[in-house]
Amino acid sequence: MAAVPPRPPTSPSPPPESGTARTGAAPLDDPAQRLGLALVCAAADPALSGVLLVDLDPRLVDPVARLFGAVLAGAAEPARPPLVLGASDRDEDLWTRIRIRGGEHGITVRTEPGPLTEGDDADGAPPLVVVPDLARLSVAGMRAAVQLLGADVVTVERGGPRRTVRPRARWLAVCRSADVGRVSRHLLDRFAVRLSAAGLRLPGVREALAETGPRPEAGAAAGEGEALFAGLPAAWRSAAAGGVRPVPVGDAAIGRARELLGPDAGVRRELALLRLARTLAALHGRPSASADDSDAAARLIGVAVPQDAPGRPESGPEPPGPAPGPTGLPGTVPERRAAGGDGRPRPRDGDRGLLDTGPAEGIGTAPGAAPSPADGSPYPEDEPAAARDTVPLSGPRRRSTGPVSTRGTVIGTRRATDLRDIAHVRTVREAAVHQRARGTERFTVSPVDLHSNVRAAAPERVLVLLLDHTCRGGTGDGNWPEVLAPFLQWAYTSRAAVQVIEVGAADAADELRAGSFTARGVLDPRVPGALYRRAGRATPLAHGVELAAHTLRRLLRRQGTGPAEAWLVVVTDGRGNVPLRVSHTGRLAGPVAAAGVEDAVEAAARIGAMERTRLHVAVVDPGREPYGDLPYVLADRLGAIVVDGRHAPGAEAAGE
């Protein structure tokens, strides 16, 4: 296809019919207008779904994200809240969402699309994903970005469900140029729109956002867009909301893109630049993308364009005066006789001093040191300054002491194949059976007698539930699954083992003592059964807290086999009417008074003294009166957070 003849303007300008007057500097001279035009292009073309801002001020991340959401939404609907990804996101949190519901027949587990895919089939504006620090993004988030950005179709197969979607989300990521080397090049190449935002200043943005705010009116998004992109034509903003029709790309544009990026640039960079040039041409109403559009796209993202570019601005005749030296910077005014990067005039040869000092060097620099990333470059990873990770898209390996076969709970024995983890009792018993047949004077152990232990895999996460059945009067008889749903969902998704300690059940074997059992997971039939027991008379809360302390101490003291994370969830109103000594002896003598409550608080203090790097504690308050402060006293000694059980989802329905 023949290329369109070169046009004199250097930067995209609105079509004549838009009626938008241009005053002052060109749009590409203002970082804020460059950012606005880049966000418009990313919103208008799904192929430019990834936007990477280098060296953006952290205080501007939220305003820019809200503005991008306003551009995506347009004037027809309010902006959607973005999805923020960070260092703690896991695959289970991104691709699927587990919903746990309680009913008459137990717990129901349902798998739904996760936040990365749930908005792809919905109507309205595309969803927005914000990454405040790309270098600190979790491995799961990096892999998700590599799979979604620039993909036409994505198939999600995880945990049984299968779903095929067309990604619609736009990604806005921020990264410092000094940290770019820590990010995988595969991930960086997925961001088609990349520009430096080191000098970006958005005056009045916070005030404009505070005045407009996210409102349900139709003009709210338009007000945010006007506050942000007042310098851009209204036709471009409407194109961002409705999209643009792709235009053909001429051979001249392709050749110019290769010339600007150099021979070492990858195919993804060339495609990204050409797609940006195609979008700019469509915004201008041109029938095809030419070499001028490639130059405009390069200037937009900060790629250097030679002075002899076909679309460079006409500077006109220069005023009389000395011409700039051969090292003059492009774009400097002639009066400056520019030669140095600091913009100061360089003296003539006749005025040169005896000592010609070189450029200033920072303290601690040495010859041969790695140069810093170039200012304003959209590809700072090309500089050799940053230290790079070997496998940035691979997760860290979990280190543990000893081989896997020697960790975990013993569940049986088998014939030994080596001398590791020998089951001594079973080995001695097998040898004793054959002593008379062997006819030896001393006790002899033969290799055929050796047996080793069979161990279950040690759980990496544990959920300990302490359920006080006598406090059901405050939360209703059927809403405990809803109250505990976040903790049960965490245990289900992380494959955590469950330890249930029950207090005050009507069918307890001993009403003066707490009962407990261990389950491999929340799907064990005994777990939902424990959530629906009838309340009894006695409340040995102190004994239940003591059992919880013993369980946690036993789990956390295991070297190499202890859990990486544990949760203790206590559902109680704090009214313990059985002292700890009565639970130990099984004999009740005399009045109890407040001894049961005091013993429970004293036992809780032992849990509060445990190390909290792996242990988290929560107390569910049923809100019973009087003595409504007892759960808070217990939580203070446990060092726990308090969850209000009165306003849990489903509490109203249970009360009806």
Image (tube, helix red, strand yellow):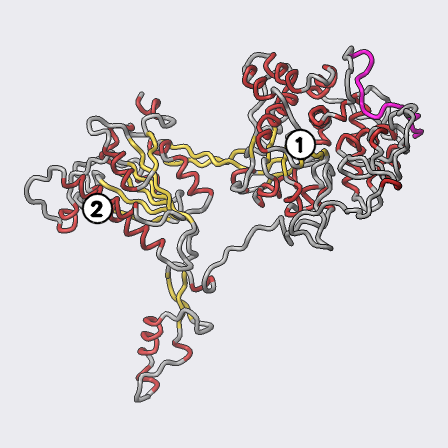
Label 2 sits on what residue type?
His
Q: Position of residue 416 (x, y in %)?
A: 43, 71
Quadrant where the image shows the N terminus = top right
Q: Position of residue 541 (x, y in %)?
A: 22, 41
- Horizontally, is 265 left or right of 489 in the view? right
The residue tagged 1 is 166
Instruction: Name above or below for residue 132 compared with residue 207.
Output: below
Quadrant where the image shows the C terminus = top left
Q: Main secondary structure of the magenta part?
A: loop
CB-based contact (under 8 Å), mark 1 and mark 2 = no
Instruction: Name above or below for residue 559 compared with residue 509.
Output: below
Q: Earlier in the sequence, mark 1 or mark 2?
A: 1
| Residue 15 is a magenta residue | yes
User: From where the camera sits, is residue 249 visible?
Assistant: yes
**Range of residues picked out in magenta:** 1-18
Instruction: Name above or below for residue 295 compared with residue 390.
Output: above
Neighbours of disc 2 within 10 Å: few (<14), some (14-19), many (20+): many
Residue at the outermost left position: 590
Q: Secondary structure at mark 1?
A: loop
Label 1 sits on what residue type?
Arg
Can you tell which mark lies on residue 399?
Answer: none
Nearest to the observer: residue 16 or residue 336: 336
| Residue 193 is a magenta residue | no
Neighbours of disc 1 within 10 Å: few (<14), some (14-19), many (20+): some
Q: Position of residue 241 (x, y in %)?
A: 68, 20
Q: CA distance from mark 1 to mark 2?
A: 55 Å
Nearest to the observer: residue 621 or residue 392: 392
The residue tagged 2 is 543
Residue 347: image quadrant is: top right
